[in-house]
Amino acid sequence: MSASLAAPAPAGAGRMTLRLVLIGAMLVLAMLPVLNRLPPDSALHVSDFIVSITGKWITYAILALAIDLAWGYAGILSLGHGAFFALGGYAIGMHLMRLIGPRGVYGHPTLPDFMVFLGYRELPWYWLGFEHFPFAILMAMAVPGLLAGVVGYLAFRSRITGVYLSIITQAMTYALMLAFFRNDMGFGGNNGFTDFKELLGMPLNTPSARSTLFYASLLLLLGSLWVCGRVTRSKLGRVLVAIRDAESRTRFLGYDVTQHKLFVFVLSAMIAGLAGALYVPQVGIINPGEFSPGNSIEAVIWVAVGGRGTLVGALLGAFSVNALKTWLTTVAPDLWLFALGGLFVAVTLFLPRGLIGLFQKERR
Amino acid sequence: MSATELAAGAPHPPRGQAVPDAVLYLDGVSVVFDGFRALNNLSLIVEAGELRAIIGPNGAGKTTMMDVITGKTRPTAGVVRFHDHDLTRLDEATIANLGIGRKFQKPTMFDALTVFENLELALKAPRGPFSCLRWVLDRTSRQKIESTMAEVGLTARAHDRAGVLSHGQRQWLEIGMLLMQDPELLLVDEPVAGMTDQETEHTAALLVRIAGARSVVVVEHDLEFVRALGSKVTVLCEGSMLSEGSIDHVQNDPRVIEVYLGR
Ligand SMILES: Nc1ncnc2c1ncn2[C@@H]1O[C@H](COP(=O)(O)OP(=O)(O)O)[C@@H](O)[C@H]1O
Ligand SMILES: [Mg+2]
């Protein structure tokens, strides 16, 4: 399966076209918040809805990029990347909760409402430090990175690959979902966190907060694309492809496969965590539902639809599948899951290299 | 211990004891798969700079012997040493980094990567993720890769993916990868299958040239090729050593004739 699905790098003219399309798309994205400021009767006006939903999709695209780095290049099919995304979201969510301060319903100076409600006397130790934004951002990377490091080390060292690895990652996100549903975990149980007031001194739910978060997401997207591209174009990227296609042969050349897989899995989890940290302030809520196994699977489908092993394909997949989802859930909400499944099957059968394959010529 | 003593069937030194000059030392090695003995009390010594040919019928255990040396298969019993290193306790990557390179019976490489990229991955260089991330191909490395491509006749295919090469070309590419690793001990499993007569001669000459500075163990069926190597020959049969000596010596050994050449 792996070798036949391996997408060759886009060649010559195709690559130029792709690069131009990518730059064009980024420019269009960057224009959206500007066009949003035009008077509503202007022909070029872009609605608040478009800006906020596109900002959300950008964070999804970053998650897709992270999945593609691990799956498309190193062959690590994680069905638990939604957990890393959610953990990043919870980290920033804790910061946002701390910033509410005495403005909560119960008016407690430090404790979030749900803690007052549950009878907490003081903040649990693991909430300390989250009042500082840089600390929360650091945790949004460090916690997913650490989890990926532990799970990855145990799995890769025991040479667990393929379906077994996918099942383990799926179990990981499921276990986290159950844990976060519990009230005594100190993360707000099934309600999670919401009613955020502000971030970095700017009130949320205002046009300026929206466009700031939008541009922050776009910057993170470009930064992640740069980092992933830096990895995949280096010799490390070729080692990852070697591991993906012939893991055991790579070992006989003297490469410590566990180390290489761990590196890419941890990096990927940290990128996913940061994406989650930008997602939560934009949607205004985080709850254990974000850990649901279906989310992780859906994110993998974005990558499969866009075309794995190309990075750009992941972005294309995330935007197009989510656009389809938004449209379909308004016109025919019941059809969405069938459409998603059908799309996945159709792409696997007819477009094994994904949508991006339409831009590529076969390399000799 | 000299080669002639061994050829005459001198007893092996006591188990586990280091042998001066021995690069590779196997003693009493057995491998049992579900009750089937693929290797049966096999002993073998390869000295520094030696070229050794291993022949034997299909299923004799030649590939299994290489699996044991490279850490792919753990022996059920016996000693496997490379200099002072106990190979039965090390993993594949560590063994490769000690300086043991292997060419597989079925040529195996990275099909999605080009000929050049396959050789670049094999090139002796730091192997960790951070080193690979920082790696820049300098002039010396490029020249090494280019001269190896010339040696194995793949210069024109440098930027073709390995997946599109013919079987013979894949043999050559894997030999090239072995050369790039610059190992101290080369294990070469059936290198000339699928090669033309001319290519076979070239391969024999290449292996003879490499030996001397390093040790080479070649498994091959093609007796003409083995003769061209002009090296000591070990005959394996049913997991044990049947005979050892010059090609003429083993070809005239009645036991060898019976189980192998006489068929
Ligand atoms: N992993 C394995 N499991 C079971 N049997 C094996 C395995 N590897 C090799 N064998 C058996 O061991 C014997 C020796 O095989 P091999 O070393 O490949 O022989 P040769 O290379 O000399 O042709 C064969 O009978 C083969 O079927
Ligand atoms: Mg064999």
Image (tube, rainbow, N blue to C red):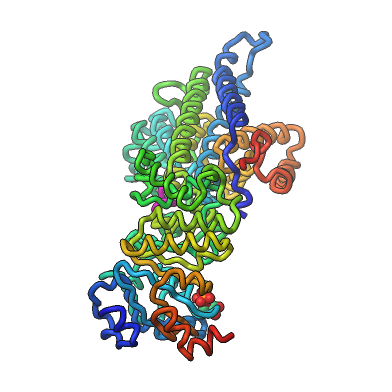
> In the image, what residue occupies the spot 62% across and 55% down?
A1
Q: Main secondary structure of the magenta part?
A: helix
Image quadrant in which the C terminus of chain B is located: bottom right
- Residue nearer the viewer, A6 or A213: A6
When asked about the image quadrant of residue A124, the answer is top left
- Any part of residue A358 in sight: yes
Q: Which residues are magenta?
A: A259-263
Could you tell me which residue is drawn at 52 percent across and 82 percent down? B34
Residue A229 percent location from the top left of the image: 48, 36
Q: Is residue B145 left or right of residue A211?
A: left
Is A297 left or right of B217, judged from the image as shown?
right
Count the marks: 0
Q: Quadrant of residue A18?
A: top right
Residue occupying image coordinates x 23% and y 75%: B20
Q: Residue at x 48, y 46 (%)?
A: B117
Residue nearer the viewer, A69 or A274: A69
Q: Where does the image place residue A53, in percent across and percent down from the top left?
A: 60, 28
Determine whether B8 is above or below B104 in the image: below
Residue A89 appears left or right of A16: left
In the image, residue B237 sits, relative to residue B146, either above or below, namely below
Vertical comparison of A262 with B50: above or below: above
Which quadrant holds the N terminus of chain B?
Answer: bottom left
Residue A183 visible to an observer of this rendering: no
Up/down of A207 relative to B59, above or below: above
Q: Could you say which is closer to the camera, residue A175 or residue B99? A: B99
- The front one of A285 and A141 is A141
Residue A262 lies within the magenta run: yes
State yes or no: residue A195 in magenta: no
x and y percentages locating residue A139 in the rendered image: 38, 40
